């Protein structure tokens, strides 16, 4: 599944329109504790979080995640979005809850991180 497929699946808006949506999503994760995500992040991960600051982008880029997904219509600060764009990190925002987002992704066969 590609980021573009996830975007459609969860009715998300792309907050980083200059970033390609063709990265493969290989697993999903939901967590708001950055140190925990740093320890468990994986390449290709779709990470659901309510955090919106610059460190979210740094952690996602470091792990080479596929995308960051913000639930409940949360919008990331412009400074963070600019950094995400420069890092090639897609940031999506969905009006669904984190629970609903993960449920939809899991129902499509995308596993939790290993």
Image: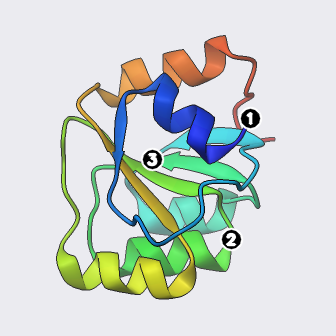
Q: Secondary structure at mark 1?
A: loop
How far is mark 1 from mark 2, CA to CA?
Answer: 18 Å
Residue at image point 59% right, 64% down:
20
Q: Are marks 3 and 1 in contact (CB under 8 Å)?
A: no
- Sequence order check, earlier mark of 2 and 3: 3
For numbered disc 2, what is the local secondary structure?
loop
The residue labelled by disc 1 is 1
Q: 113 above or below 80?
A: above
Residue 63: give its label.
2
Disc 2 to disc 3, how far (Cα)? 14 Å
Residue at image location 29% in from the left, 25% down from the top: 96
Residue, x 65% and y 62% (percent of image)?
Answer: 65
Residue 85: image location, x then y, percent: 45, 79
The disc placed on residue 31 is 3
For the rendered model, the colour scheme is: rainbow
Q: Please tell me how crowded label 3 is: few (under 14), some (14-19), or many (20+) other residues with Cα within 10 Å.
A: some
Q: Where residue 100 is drawn, which disc sits there?
A: none
- Tell me if 45 is positioned left or right of 11 in this view: right
Q: Residue at x 68, y 16 (%)?
A: 108
Q: Earlier in the sequence, mark 3 or mark 1?
A: 1
Q: Nearer the viewer, residue 91 or 54?
A: 91
- Measured as percent of width and height from the top left, residue 100 is found at 39, 18
Task: Give the mark, 1 or 2, whose residue is nearer the N terminus.
Answer: 1
Circle 3: element type: loop
Q: Is residue 31 above or below residue 89?
A: above
Mark 1 closeness class: few <14, some 14–19, many ≥20 residues within 10 Å: some
Which numbered mark, 3 or 1, is in the foreground of this view? 1
Q: Are marks 2 and 3 in contact (CB under 8 Å)?
A: no
């Amino acid at each position: 599944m590609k980021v573009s497929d996830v975007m459609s699946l969860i009715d998300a808006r792309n907050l980083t329109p200059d970033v390609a949506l063709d990265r493969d999503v290989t697993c999903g994760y939901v967590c708001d504790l950055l140190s925990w995500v740093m320890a468990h992040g994986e390449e290709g991960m779709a990470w659901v979080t309510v955090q919106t600051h610059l460190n979210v982008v740094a952690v996602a880029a470091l792990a080479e995640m596929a995308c960051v997904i913000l639930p409940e219509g949360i919008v990331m600060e412009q400074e963070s979005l600019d950094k995400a764009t420069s890092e090639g990190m897609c940031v999506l925002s969905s009006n669904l809850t984190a629970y609903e987002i993960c449920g939809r992704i899991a129902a499509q066969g995308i596993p939790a991180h290993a």
